[in-house]
Image (spheres, helix red, strand yellow):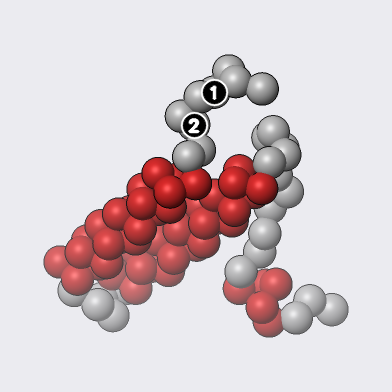
């Protein structure tokens, strides 16, 4: 039986280059995708206004971009 946490917040396997910063960014990216899914479902069902959903998704996107910049992911894609 699955616990509630793994059902609500499933984690997918990471297939990229295994470095700590890549793993952290992958976790952040998965969290972003889950939250956007919940926010869009709430907006679609009329539970929150569309303008609020858009602003929340924009804030999440800015947080994800900041995370990527701080971790240095993708800056030198061909460096070993």
- Distance from disc 1 to disc 2, alpha carbons, whole Å, reads 5 Å
In the rendering, at what x and y percent does residue 63 appear? Answer: 35, 58
Give the SS element for disc 1: loop
**Callouts 1 and 2 close, C-beta under 8 Å:** yes
Residue 50 in sight from this viewpoint = no
Does residue 24 sit above or below 34 in this rendering? above
- Residue 17, percent from left and from top: 69, 33
- How busy is the neighbourhood of tag 2: few (under 14 within 10 Å), some, or many (20 plus)? few
- Residue found at the far left of this picture: 51
* Above or below, comparing residue 75 to residue 46 in the picture: above
Please say whether residue 66 is visible from this viewpoint: yes
Residue under the image location 75 percent in, 81 percent down: 3
For the N terminus, the quadrant is bottom right
Residue 49 picture quarter: bottom left
Numbered badge on residue 30: none
51 relative to 75 in the view: left or right: left
Determine which residue is flagged by label 2. 74
User: Residue 35 lies in what quarter of the image?
Assistant: bottom left
Q: Which residue is mark 1?
A: 77
Residue neighbourhood size for the residue with mark 1, other residues' Cα within 10 Å, grouped as few (<14), some (14–19), many (≥20): few
Q: Which residue shows up at 15% across the image and 66% down it?
A: 51
Q: Position of residue 24 (x, y in %)?
A: 59, 53
């Amino acid at each position: 039986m699955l616990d509630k946490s793994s059902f609500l917040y499933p984690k997918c396997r990471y297939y990229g280059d295994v470095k700590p910063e890549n793993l952290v960014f992958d976790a952040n990216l998965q969290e972003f995708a889950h939250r956007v899914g919940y926010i869009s479902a709430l907006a679609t069902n009329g539970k929150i206004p569309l303008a609020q959903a858009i602003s929340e998704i924009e804030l999440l996107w800015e947080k994800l971009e900041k995370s990527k910049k701080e971790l240095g992911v993708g800056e030198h894609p061909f460096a070993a």
